[in-house]
Amino acid sequence: MAFTLCGRARRLVSATSVHKNGFLQRLQQTGSDRFQQLGEAKAIRLIPRRTNMVQELGIREELMQENKENRENRELETRYDFLGEMRQRFLRFKRQKYLPEIDKFQALAIAQSPKVMVIGCADSRVCPSYVLGFQPGEAFTIRNVANLVTPIQNGSTETNSALEFAVTTLQVENIIVMGHSNCGGIAALMSHENHQEHHSSLVERWVMNGKAAKLRTQADLSHLSFDEQCRNCEKESIKDSVMNLITYPWIRERVKRGEVKIHGCYYNLSDCSLEKWRLSSDKNNNGFYLSDREIWS
């Protein structure tokens, strides 16, 4: 139906232009079959009816355009409302926190000296500063999908470059690898077929750095459900990341000298509990292991 109307509209525009510009007689003289058959009187009677069709089509197009603009305006209003909320939050922060502690924030404007480095997950539900109560200037933080730390042999990443700066320049005294339950990155890792070599996305490519934790989980806990295996793999990947930190010489030496302590934390979103481990060194065989498991609840 739409195609038929468009065809009629095109014929009408042509006929209207002919009528208005005085070319009807010229077209008749050149042998136009249509006008020879209809005659000038019949053609003129058709023009107003076809003109009404064009006007109706024009009105419909205008209404459609108006509806589209209204939708876009509503979307803009929603975005602007969010920006307005952000503005209010910022001003509230300035009024309630910044100004009452202006000396502290002025000092932080010059330099930072955090004692803690946190490697957390990019998940929006798990903000280390919010969950662990860090104040500005207390924790140097880097976040990535599934809070993974790769060994030094894997090359440079944003995470280990931040680590290097935190340890060698800022001289932090504690490094925390903080994971959490219901991690989408670990779920993606566990869902990936082991025999599949091609990784179709950047996320798949990244989370495969936790493949060792996945394989251990599948080997030891194959009788458990997928969700239960994910919970286990979330913890195992934290432990692997903690051990990978020791592959960096400038961390390993500081841990041996007692200048840096390394911790693993697992935050359970469901019951707001925190499971914690500490990296210990075995002076007899120059090795490292996880110990002192605690649960804060």
Image (tube, grey):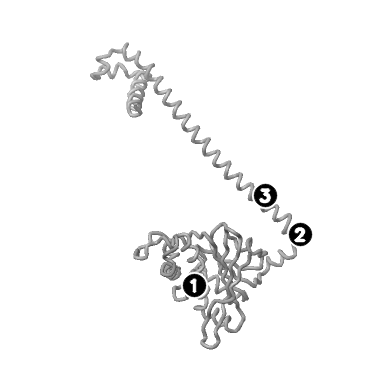
Q: Tag 3 or tag 2, which sits nearer the N-term?
A: 3
Measured as percent of width and height from the top left, residue 106 is found at: 72, 64
Q: Mark 2 touching mark 1, by CB under 8 A? A: no
Measured as percent of width and height from the top left, residue 183 is found at: 51, 60
**Nearest the camera: 123 or 14?**
123
Measured as percent of width and height from the top left, residue 276 is found at: 59, 70
**Nearest the camera: 44 or 23?**
44
Return the residue at label 2: 100
Q: Tag 1 or tag 2, which sits nearer the N-term?
A: 2
What amino acid type is highlighted by mark number 1? Asp
Secondary structure at badge 1 equals helix
Query: What is the C-alpha distance between the residues marked 2 and 3?
Result: 18 Å
Q: Residue 205: in sight, yes or no? A: yes
Secondary structure at badge 2 equals helix
Return the residue at label 1: 240
Identify the mark at residue 88; answer none if there is no mark.
3
